Image: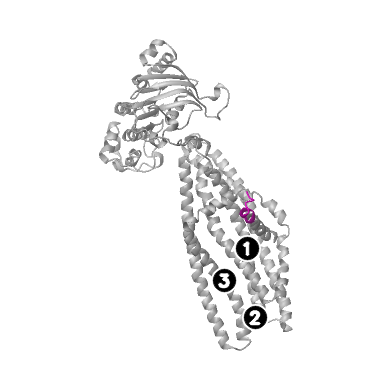
Amino acid sequence: MNGSPNMGNIGRLFADLWRLLRGQDRRGHKVRWLVAQLRPYRGRVGLMFLGLLLATAAGLAPPYLAGRAIDSGILAGDLSALDLIVVAFVAVSVVYALATYLQTYMVGWIGTRVLQDLRERVFTHIQSMSIGFFTRRSPGVLISRMTNDIEALNQLVTTGVVTMFSSTLTLVGVVVILLVLDVKLALITFLTFPLLAIASLIFRVVSAGAYKATRERIAAITAYLQESLSGVRVVRSFGQEPRHLDEMTALNEANREVNMKTVYLNASYFPAVEMLSAIGTAVILLYGGSQAIDGAIQIGVIVAFVGYLNTFFEPIQQLSQLYTTYQQGMAALDKIFDLLETKPDMVDAPGAIDPGELRGEIDLEGVWFSYGEEGESGADTWALEGVDLHVPPGQTLALVGATGAGKSTFAKLVARFYDPQKGTVRVDGHDLRGVQQRALRRQLGIVPQEGFLFSGSVRENVAFGRPEASDEEIEAAISAVGATEFVAALPEGLDTQIGERGIQLSAGQRQLVAFARALLAEPRILILDEATSNVDVRTEKTIERGLERLLHGRTAIVIAHRLSTIRRAGKIVVLEHGQIAEQGTHDELIAANGPYSKLYGAWSESSAA
């Protein structure tokens, strides 16, 4: 029973590989894709296999040479023959050392490059995905795909391939050599093999899904860790550390349980192999020794048999362990392929154009949009319903309404983070579906409610949209939004490192940097999504002075609750339940005594209070 995992693993490994080669496994195309990642390095792969063949052949020679040294040299009393065999032994050892070096170096080189290529490919694919993708996928799971799963694939592509070929060649080579040395003794030795196959079916049932479960558990831990670290301030503020510790403990325990299954699978065969090796050696010594006493077989042959028997069980161990690598690698391949086969929700249409410099004219014609699946019925599923709106170039449009009215959705459609299920969004008369996304976004500036900053310096963050901007242009943008004073007070000015997400700065300072970043990018269309709601009154007044320059000559969509920002807008649109309730200037809407007038009255009372 203890030996079953070995032959069970090896049998399943080769059975799975055979199905893959014959195209009978659903993952066959994935494996072919994976092998194709080695194509750019086929010259080095060839060198790796050359080293592998030489090292395997050289590794098979010592037991045979030891046997010949005993029979042809020591027992025969032939010193010259012994000298030749010793020279051959040394030469084989040198070849083995050089070939092993070549093989090991090439495996490491290829593995490092394939790992790099896979990460870049996955990262490039993730970067091409639309915003909706990131609302459905946990960042922690995506990180796990680029770290844990790619590392598992790397082990399969490099170490796994080498082990499979090397161990298989060694196994076949040992069988052939044993048969050549003595057929009867070899066949007796092979009688131990059926013991390795007992209960392989039971083992297959036990091992099914274990390795896939380990990939899922580690992805869950990575996702939870990422979320917990990102929200550590919220956790601390509500004193929920114990609950997070309990949750992580539960995830860790679940991970331990699924990993213990694989631990059993990995650990069970070592004593079995050692025991079977000992049994095989005992059989050889007992039967072969009696034959040698009778003069039917040479002593050197028995010595060679004992040496090859030890060599024989080593590749069995390696191939059995390889099944673990294979299972983990294939589980990781399924996860990565699922990611790579996920198509972006939005792609540039064939023949999509670059409209050149935009004037900023925006038109929404009969726009309906839902974050759910297209075709869902019921008014509650639509974030926008039948919206028609014209925004002339250079106008500031203020969107107002209650939370969930569709204001941010409106801005996301103009930025083409999403496409409407019905209707058309146009910029300068061009349907956004026919405009290159890159061409649109490079003329788009967005300042969200909480400006996201990257780790690095103030200079790097301000110049994010225009990395080629000069110091003078960066300083001018900072000055225009009123951030010169706080930047000058920083320890290293523009070169001050602000930490991940700009943690070294206050909320107001981060927002000023975000405004400067938007201004430096010189967008033709600017979207301000509650951009001043998280700053204090003094900072807001500083930003408002900068807004005059920032909005000048640009089409702007401003989502705000602050009265000063709304009153400055050329047009105000009131949204209710995804529909335009009314639109006009501030004075027109106040005079109409409609929804806007009520909202404005509530804001005025709140401000006065």
Residue 607: percent from the left, percent from the top?
A: 38, 19
Q: Position of residue 10 (x, y in %)?
A: 65, 59
Which one is closest to the eye, mark 3 or mark 2? 3
Residue 563 makes an appearance in the image: yes
* Residue type (three-letter) at the residue carrying disc 2: Gly
Name the spot of residue 191 as percent of width and height, x first: 73, 68
In this rendering, is residue 210 above or below 313?
A: above
Name the residue beneath numbered marker 3: 57
- Viewer-proximal residue among 442 and 409: 442
Left or right side of 472 for 169: right
Which label belongs to residue 317? 1
- Give residue 214's position: percent from left, percent from top: 60, 48
Q: Please report whichever mark, 3 or 2, sits nearer to the chain's N-terminal start.
A: 3
Left or right: 299 with respect to 469? right
Determine the secondary structure under disc 2: helix
Judging depth in this view, the residue of 335 and 147 nearest the camera is 335
Label 3 residue SS: helix
For the point 63% across and 88% down, which residue is it? 76
Q: How many marks?
A: 3
Of 159 and 42, which appears nearest the observer? 42
Is disc 2 in contact with disc 1, using a CB cutoff of under 8 Å? Answer: no
- The residue singled out by tag 2 in the image is 300
User: Within 10 angstroms of label 3, few (less than 14), some, or many (20 or more) residues?
Assistant: some
Residue interval drawn in magenta: 17-25
